[in-house]
Image (tube, rainbow, N blue to C red):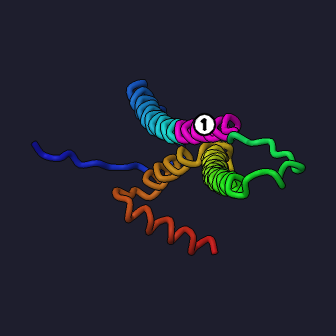
Amino acid sequence: MDVQERTIALKKEHANKTTYEIIKEESRNAMDAAGNTGQYIRFVNNHINNQNKEINKIKKIKEKFDQEVQLLQNHNPNLLKIDTDSLDRMNIEIVTKYLQELLVEKGLTKKRLDELKSDIENVEDDLIKQEEQIEGLNEELEIKKIPGPNGKNTEIEIKNELSSLVEKYGIENLSNVLKGVKSSKNLAS
């Protein structure tokens, strides 16, 4: 089996394409579009999974926060209503012990409050990171949606341009295309 020799004719007018060539080109475009769609679907699924993980993480933090708030609300130390008039009659040891218990309770409450503030700061940081990711993804999507100078998709435009260079200069591989592009830029400037 010998390799057939290929020739490319350079003409100003394009020859009419046969039905087979049209179908072949359209099927190639459809396969390319399907591949791009598959990549996009995988990207979106990955992004959704990451967002679900973040949401679950936030839900856990919220549950912990709700539990802590409930503990704070339900936690009523057995406060003795001390009558200031009866302080003189009360035992100093009992009042001192009660004061120490109140100080310990205050310390525990303050510690819980600090933990909750720390959790809130962590969640806010996560939220800021997510917003930055969303903005970045939106910018990337906008960049990909921007049409080329003639209104076509940039990727399709590049493919068409490469095809026309192959036809125009009879180039067989990409390095020759790049040389042709460089030489055409040098001629233009």
Q: Amino acid at mark 1?
A: Gln
**Would you say 149 lies left or right of 17 here?**
right
**Would you say 139 lies left or right of 174 here?**
right
* Residues packed near mark 1 inside 10 Å, few (<14), some (14 to 19) or many (20 plus): few
Disc 1 target residue:
67
| Quadrant in which the C terminus is drawn | bottom right
Pinpoint residue 56: horizontal percent, then vertical percent: 53, 36
How many numbered marks are there? 1
Pinpoint residue 118: horizontal percent, then vertical percent: 63, 55
**Would you say 100 lies left or right of 167 here?**
right
Q: Residue at x 51, y 71 (%)?
A: 183
Which structural element holds mark 1? Answer: helix
Q: Residue at x 57, y 40 (%)?
A: 64
Majority secondary structure in the magenta region? helix
Residue range of the region highlighted in magenta in the rendering: 55-76
Q: Is residue 36 visible?
A: no
